[in-house]
Structure formats: structure tokens, C-alpha cells
Image: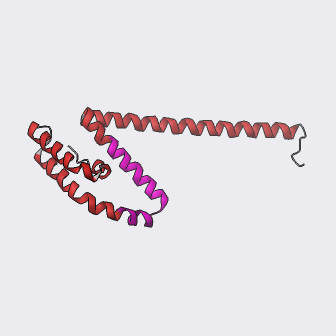
């Protein structure tokens, strides 16, 4: 199981003892390996240190990189939540379907935009052939 460190970054500090207790219960039940529980506990220890450094690091990075990193973190959080609900294979399948849907949406948007530009160009060419001028 992958360590959900991105989800820990979004967890409020007041809920950290509850997260630790939930991990301990999951280890007792057998759903989480002790090695994964140790990784989660160490991640919880690093969260306060990392949270103080994030604004300084983000201020030095270009906007496109911050947006890309935010997208990657959001995908990791979503995959972690899906892995908890569906398992690793189900989460992989759901993320693949999300990626395919996103590519399809981008393709439809680009097709629609290019079709609109072509129509506007055709209208302008037809008006020019009729002798229309655009000077006022």
C-alpha cells in the first residue's frame, strides 16, 4: 500500500491523533502492514516541518510549475482515496478512466474552437466577396 502523504498534508493538525489511532486500529485488524503504519507515522511527524517551508518554496517557483505540482498532488490524493475505497486495481482503473475522459474533453474543446474559427473565417471571406468593408 502506498503511503498517503499528500492526504496527510491536507489533514488538520488537530486530527493527527485520530489518524494515528485509526492507523493503529487498521494494523490490529490486519488491513495495513506495520511498515506502512510506520511510514504514515513518520509522515505525520514531518508534516509540521514541511508546512512551514511550503509558502517560501512556492513563492520562488514559476506559476506553471506550481499549477502542475498542484495537479499532481490532487491526482495523488484522489488516487489514495480511491485506493482506500476500491483497492489498488480499482483505483488504477478509475484513474485511467479519468485520464481518458480528460483527454476526450480536451479534444472536443479543441475541435469546437477550431470549428468556430473556421466558421468565422468563412463568414469573413463570404462578406469580402460580396464587397463588404469593415471601415467605419
Q: Position of residue 136 (x, y in %)?
A: 90, 48
91 on left or right of 132: left
- Vertical side of 74 occupied by 107: above or below: above
The magenta stretch spans residue 70: yes
Magenta segment main secondary structure: helix
- Vertical side of 34 occupied by 88: above or below: above
Task: Identify the colour scheme used.
Answer: secondary structure
Q: Position of residue 85 (x, y in %)?
A: 26, 33
- Vertical side of 60 occupied by 5: above or below: above
Q: Position of residue 69 (x, y in %)?
A: 40, 54
> What residue sits 17% from the left and 48% below the top?
20
> What residue sits 31% from the left and 41% below the top?
79
The magenta stretch spans residue 74: yes
Closer to us: 14 or 100 = 14
Residue situated furthest front in the rendering: 14
> What residue sits 89% from the left and 41% below the top?
132
- The part of the image, by quadrant, that contains residue 56 is bottom left
35 on left or right of 130: left
> What residue sits 45% from the left and 34% below the top?
101
- Vertical side of 44 occupied by 52: above or below: below
Count of residue discs:
0
Q: Position of residue 90 (x, y in %)?
A: 28, 32
- For the N terminus, the image quarter is top left
> Magenta residues, as a range?
54-78
47 on left or right of 74: left
Amino acid at each position: 500500500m502506498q503511503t498517503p502523504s499528500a492526504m496527510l498534508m491536507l489533514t488538520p493538525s488537530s486530527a493527527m491523533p485520530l489518524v494515528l489511532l485509526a492507523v493503529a486500529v487498521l494494523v490490529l485488524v490486519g488491513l495495513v502492514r506495520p511498515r506502512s503504519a510506520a511510514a504514515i507515522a513518520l509522515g505525520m511527524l514531518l508534516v509540521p516541518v514541511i508546512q512551514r517551508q511550503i509558502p517560501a518554496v512556492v513563492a520562488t517557483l514559476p506559476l506553471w510549475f506550481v499549477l502542475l505540482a498542484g495537479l499532481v498532488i490532487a491526482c495523488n490524493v484522489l488516487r489514495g482515496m480511491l485506493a482506500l475505497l476500491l483497492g489498488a486495481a480499482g483505483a488504477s482503473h478509475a484513474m485511467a478512466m479519468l485520464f481518458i475522459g480528460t483527454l476526450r474533453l480536451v479534444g472536443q474543446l479543441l475541435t469546437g474552437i477550431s470549428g468556430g474559427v473556421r466558421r468565422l473565417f468563412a463568414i469573413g471571406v463570404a462578406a469580402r466577396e460580396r464587397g463588404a468593408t469593415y471601415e467605419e
